[in-house]
Image (tube, rainbow, N blue to C red):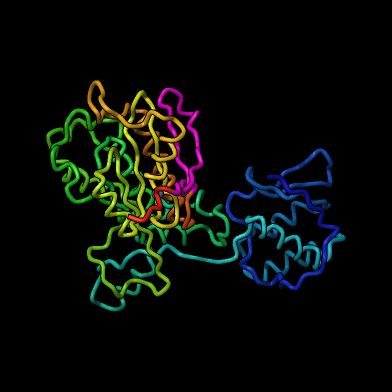
């Protein structure tokens, strides 16, 4: 989306410019155009065009991480050396803010308390995280996540609050697929600390075997270990945010909105599906690959969005051939390595979108993944089927 606005044709506004720390989010750029007095400010996602003889000074003023006094001084210099009025600049700033290019709130990384010392003075120093190597490491690891989260619609800070919220989601993975292991690792490393495998996951195949090695989280040195032991190790190794030792009710904030999602790989027992539907459990089913083709979704919010039975009924009407009678080979064939990585990353991105924004593109739609041509993944809308009713 490109927006073209001229800052000379602006209306009055009541926003006070001294409300700094309003400043550009990290990654905002100033672009020149063919016209030497016309510039754009923005990112590859959104830009605002404006006419100015002091574009660079304006950009530096809004990019500066300085005190309110110094910022006011920079503004005075711009007003003195150009024909811009204060009102114009205020209005321009609010346009940039509407476009999501400005951060106007400050947030900090919130991590659960670690035991430091019983001596109050020592604990106080530690809570400021000065010289705290693991906190510095965490800040570096979070930076690439912010590159995504700060651009979510409505985000007014550096994106850290979004990452803090991922800590409160609960994801449970069931079924069996190498994509499931990969998904587990991706979510943990993205800050979804409470990602776990369902009770009884891999009960029939507790040990790691050759097929688990898929250029990812499980290596040949893990062969013969139990799957549970390795995934426990993994959660300590790669989890972005530290997992607190015990959760207590007091820690939960008053405006706490918990996002819980059960993700199942492969065919789901109809009894469990009925149970999830009647309990109002939000869930997502990833179908089996068949003919190098598979289906992901929809994300089912029982009673609110189309469920998997709605999809089956729609398919039955449209395709005719949906009731399987017999098949050659194994019914639960493993995904190829690239396919497993693609499916897990796609599912992880859907889960993060759900946690970060409270909604998902996959509510009311499914993905059809062609393993022979991954870039041809189709996003298909589905609706609730009248004869399903979703009222199990
Ligand atoms: Zn339904």
Q: Is 142 included in the stretch rendered in magenta?
A: no
Q: Nearer the viewer, residue 306 or 287?
A: 306
Q: Nearer the viewer, residue 61 or 88?
A: 88
Q: Say which residue appears at 36% left-offset and 61% top-offset.
A: 168
Tell me the quadrant of the picture where the N terminus can be found: top right
Percent across and percent down for residue 215 are 30, 30
201 horizontally vs 158: left or right: left
Percent across and percent down for residue 193 are 32, 55
Q: Residue furthest front?
A: 387
In the figure, residue 73 lies in which quadrant?
Answer: bottom right
105 horizontally vs 272: left or right: right
Q: How many marks?
A: 0
Q: Say which residue appears at 40% left-offset and 40% top-offset.
A: 313
Q: Say which residue appears at 79% left-offset and 61% top-offset.
A: 78
- Residue 147 position (above or below residue 18): above
In the figure, residue 119 lies in which quadrant?
Answer: bottom left
Q: Say which residue appears at 38% left-offset and 55% top-offset.
A: 302
302 horizontally vs 21: left or right: left
Q: Is residue 241 visible?
A: no
Q: Which residues are magenta?
A: 361-386
Percent across and percent down for residue 125 are 35, 71
Q: Residue furthest bottom?
A: 120
């Amino acid at each position: 989306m490109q927006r073209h606005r001229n800052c000379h044709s602006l209306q009055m506004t009541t926003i006070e410019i001294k409300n700094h720390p309003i400043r550009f989010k990290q990654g905002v750029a100033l672009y020149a155009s063919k016209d030497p007095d016309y510039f754009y400010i923005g990112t590859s996602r959104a830009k605002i065009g404006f006419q100015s003889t002091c574009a660079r000074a304006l950009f530096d003023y809004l990019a500066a991480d300085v005190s309110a006094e110094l910022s006011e001084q920079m503004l005075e210099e711009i007003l003195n050396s150009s024909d811009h009025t204060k009102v114009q600049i205020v209005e321009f700033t609010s346009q940039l803010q509407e476009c999501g290019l400005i951060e106007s709130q400050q947030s900090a990384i919130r991590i659960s308390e670690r035991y430091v010392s019983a001596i109050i003075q020592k604990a106080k120093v530690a809570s400021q995280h000065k010289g705290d190597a693991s906190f510095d490491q965490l800040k570096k690891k979070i930076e690439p996540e912010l590159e995504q989260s700060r651009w979510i619609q409505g985000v007014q800070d550096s994106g850290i609050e979004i990452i803090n919220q991922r800590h409160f989601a609960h994801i449970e993975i069931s079924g069996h697929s190498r994509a499931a292991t990969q998904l587990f690792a991706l979510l943990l490393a993205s800050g979804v600390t409470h990602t776990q495998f369902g009770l009884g996951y891999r009960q029939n195949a507790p040990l790691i075997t050759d097929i688990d090695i898929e250029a990812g989280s499980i290596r040949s040195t893990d062969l013969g270990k139990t799957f549970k032991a390795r995934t426990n190790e993994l959660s300590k190794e790669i989890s972005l945010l530290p997992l607190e030792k015990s959760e207590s009710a007091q820690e939960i904030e008053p405006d706490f909105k918990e996002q819980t999602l059960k993700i199942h790989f492969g065919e789901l027992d109809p009894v469990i599906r009925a149970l999830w539907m009647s309990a109002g459990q939000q869930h997502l089913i990833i179908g089996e690959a068949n003919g190098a083709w598979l289906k992901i979704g929809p994300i089912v919010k029982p009673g609110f969005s189309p469920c998997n039975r709605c999809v089956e009924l729609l398919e039955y009407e449209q395709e005719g051939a949906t009731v399987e009678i017999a098949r050659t080979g194994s019914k639960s064939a493993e995904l190829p390595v690239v396919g497993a990585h693609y499916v897990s990353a796609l599912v992880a991105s859907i889960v993060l979108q759900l946690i970060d924004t409270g909604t998902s593109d996959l509510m009311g739609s499914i993905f059809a993944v062609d393993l022979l041509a991954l870039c041809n993944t189709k996003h298909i809308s589905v609706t609730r089927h009248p004869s399903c009713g979703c009222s199990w």
